[in-house]
Image (spheres, rainbow, N blue to C red):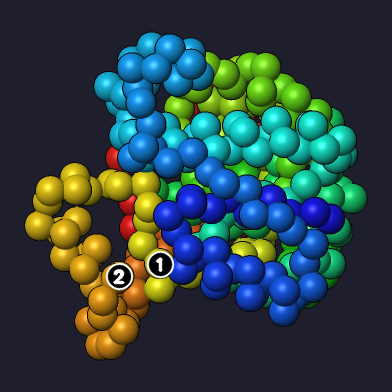
Amino acid sequence: MHAYVVNLARSADRRTSIVAALERAGQDYEIFTGVDGQALDFSDPAVRGELAPGFLASFRPGEAGCALSHINVYRKILADGRDRALVLEDDVIVPPELPGLADAIGSCLQGAEAALLCFDSNADEDVLLSRRDAVALPSGRQLVFPLEVGQLQSTAGYVITREACERMVKLAVPVQTKADGWGLFRQIGALDQVRCVVPLGVHKDPWFGSTIGYNADTSLKARALALIDRFDPGMVKRAVAYRRERIHRRHTRVKFVDDVTRSAAAPWRRSRTAP
């Protein structure tokens, strides 16, 4: 299965890292240049036309760039005539079994569907999953249904069908929410269903921080993290990476429950927080 890797032009270190990992895994891929929210001109009518009115009142410019990047990936998948595709962000750890895993997942999908290889819950709560209709995947993984699609966050890695791309381009534009607003996408009919891979198929690399800009560029925290990411290869950067990994583990806890109700209209969050 072909992979589209979302990468900002300014993120050369991430591009180098993930290209090396994909080459080692033997994964077919292309680098897709994403929309940099920091460089967007929000007075441009073309940009405003892609975003729902009031989007920036609820979300950051970086979140606009991320959402538009994924919409553009869907357009590229359609233009390339692919029935299914793997979408990756450039800060994931690529396991050696990824090519076979992605193919196995793709063979299970139908209609307008997406399967998340990486997901989390922004709140300190377990992601609730059901074993009903679980499908066995390679490497001891399973493809399962979440009880509440609105719990799911992350666009770090997922397989998506052509029909889902068609509906996302048609129904999710102008953009109303973040790229990982899976609950809303179900509500508006852009997706028939969203499934999850457990254990996770890819993980976020804690060595890299977010490029979305959850902290104001002028804030002390943002300046400090930028300096650490750029100049410190030692203990401080490792400590920051360790903290990111702990947060990621906490937010990716899952719990299998007996209730198999799957909500198509699960609530979707507008949280601005992130690891």
Q: The residue under label 2 is which amino acid type?
A: Asp
Horizontal side of 54 relative to 67 (left or right) equals left
- State the mark number for residue 208: 1
Quadrant holding the C terminus: bottom left
Sequence order check: which comes first, mark 1 or mark 2? Answer: 1
Query: Disc 1 vs disc 2: which is toward the camera?
Result: 2
* 275 versus 262 height, above or below: below
x, y (%) of residue 53?
A: 38, 12
Query: Residue 98's spot in the image, x, y percent?
Result: 74, 68
**How many numbered marks appear?**
2
- The residue nearer to you, when weighing 220 against 142, is 220
Which residue does the image show at 29% across and 71% down from the upper left? 230
Q: How crowded is mark 1: few (under 14 residues within 10 Å), some or many (20 or more)?
A: some
Relative height, residue 63 to residue 28 (above, below):
above
Query: Picture quarter containing residue 246?
Result: bottom left
Q: Secondary structure beneath disc 2?
A: helix
- Identified at 72% across, 36% down, the residue is 76
In percent of the image, x 26 and y 80: which residue is there? 232
Q: Are marks 1 and 2 in contact (CB under 8 Å)?
A: yes
Query: Is residue 123 left or right of 5 when viewed as pictured?
Result: left
Which residue is the site of mark 2? Answer: 229
| Residue 169 visible within the image | yes
Residue 190 falls in which quadrant of the image? top right
Q: Which of 8 and 255 is in front in this view?
A: 8
